[in-house]
Image (cartoon, rainbow, N blue to C red):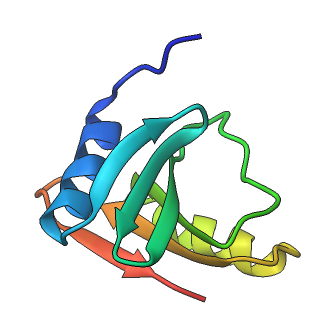
Amino acid sequence: MAAVSTPLDERARSIFDDIGYTVSRTEDGLRAAHKWREVGVTVLEEDTTIPKSGEMHCFVTQASRAPDLGDRLSRMDISYDWAVIGVRDDGGYDVIRP
């Protein structure tokens, strides 16, 4: 099944591009790489599954949903480092970390 590009997906790419990462599409979403660091990037839609494993992961969602997602991730037993990017309507974004 081919990946579908959404405005949130495009915004996630743009955010990582702007901070110097090379972004590529994967089967499960996006991969952002910079120097030694690789980060899995998932644009969180209603039915998106949260990965159970990995090393570093960033979830991108609407700003209004970001705090709830951060709380949900904090309660889960996941073993990787994570962050949530909440994209605002004005084009800015906020980052939530555990």
Q: Residue furthest right?
A: 77
37 and 28: which is toward the camera: 37
Number of marks: 0
Residue at figure coordinates x 65%, y 39% from the top left: 48
Q: Residue furthest bottom?
A: 98
Quadrant of the image containing the C terminus: bottom right
- List x then y, in percent, for residue 73: 71, 71
Give the side of residue 1 with respect to residue 78, left or right.
Answer: left
Q: Residue furthest front?
A: 36
- List x then y, in percent, for residue 72: 72, 69
- List x then y, in percent, for residue 78: 82, 73
Residue at figure coordinates x 54%, y 46% from the top left: 44
Give the side of residue 26 with respect to residue 63, left or right.
Answer: right
Q: Quadrant of residue 54?
A: bottom right
98 and 35: which is toward the camera: 35
Quadrant of the image containing the N terminus: top right
- List x then y, in percent, for residue 55: 67, 73
> Does the rendering let one see residue 25?
yes
Give the side of residue 36 with respect to residue 54, left or right.
Answer: left
For residue 18, above or below residue 47:
below
Residue at figure coordinates x 25%, y 68% from the top left: 93
